[in-house]
Image (tube, rainbow, N blue to C red):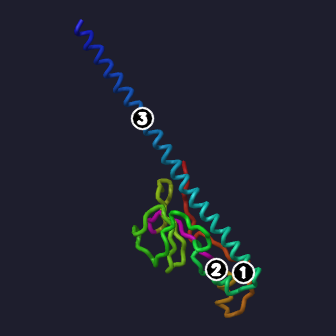
Amino acid sequence: MRSRHVQAGGSKLFEFVIVLMLLGALSLMVLEYMRHYIEAAEKSAMETTVMYLRSALRLRLAEALAAENAAYAIKITRDNPMDWLQDKPYNYAGTFDAPPPGSIDDGKWYFDTKSRELVYLVEYGREFIPDQDGLKRVRYHIIAPSLENAIKENRIISVSEIVREVSLVKVKPYTWEFK
């Protein structure tokens, strides 16, 4: 009778271990899906911020055009894009002059005053391909081709010419693909 009791206890322990292993495997699968969705949410939040910045840029340019204020239009092309927003994103770290890699936390935006670039440092970038410097970042800058050509040619330019081509663009294309 005693050996049957020991056998039954052993088989219950074996079943318990199997159940724990299955739960562990399922937990790992769920965790993997969660990581994927966290990264997708980060990409979406970054792109939404860029969308807000582009909308704010269009509003500022419309103000300059309506007021026929060339000086204001030129100032816009030199601005930190985050200054266009009424409320800066919670993950905006501020302005820096060519900060060294690793000095700003991942998942943050910052404006580099030296390069005049708005930079996003990717936090959850398993699906993000690093740039030529090996960094997981996305960089944006303001371009104003008509203004730049007018400055090179030393000629006067109208507000409408400045405003027509100003945009916030990626410095380099990035690859953030999900499998």
Q: CA distance from mark 3 to mark 1?
A: 59 Å
Instruction: Give the labeled residue for mark 2.
Output: 76
Left or right of 49, for residue 130: left
Q: Tag 3, which secondary structure?
A: helix
Quarter of the image that includes the N terminus: top left
Q: Which mark is residue 25?
A: 3
Q: Amino acid at mark 2?
A: Ile
Q: Amino acid at mark 1?
A: Ala
Q: Amino acid at mark 3?
A: Ala
Give neighbour class at mark 2: few <14, some 14-19, many 20+ (Cα, 10 Å): many
Task: Specify which label sits upstream in the sequence, 2 or 1.
Answer: 1
**Magenta-drawn stretch, dominant element (helix, strand or loop):** strand
Instruction: Give the labeled residue for mark 1.
Output: 64
> Answer yes or no: do the residues labelled 2 and 1 have beta carbons within 8 Å?
yes
How many marks can you see? 3
Instruction: Please identify, in this view, whether the residue under mark 3 or under mark 1 is nearer the observer.
Output: 1
Say if the magenta span includes residue 177: no
Q: Residue at x 65, y 84 (%)?
A: 74
Q: Tag 1, which secondary structure?
A: helix
Left or right of 59, for residue 15: left
Relative image position of residue 118 (x, y in whole percent): 54, 72
Relative vertical location of residue 19 with respect to residue 100 in this rendering, above or below: above
Q: CA distance from mark 2 to mark 1?
A: 9 Å
Q: CA distance from mark 3 to mark 2?
A: 54 Å
Q: Tag 2, which secondary structure?
A: helix
Q: Residue at x 48, y 48 (%)?
A: 35
- For the magenta stretch, what is the residue range? 133-142
> Answer yes or no: do the residues labelled 3 and 2 have beta carbons within 8 Å?
no
Relative vertical location of residue 117 with respect to residue 134 in this rendering, above or below: below
Relative image position of residue 164 (x, y in whole percent): 73, 77
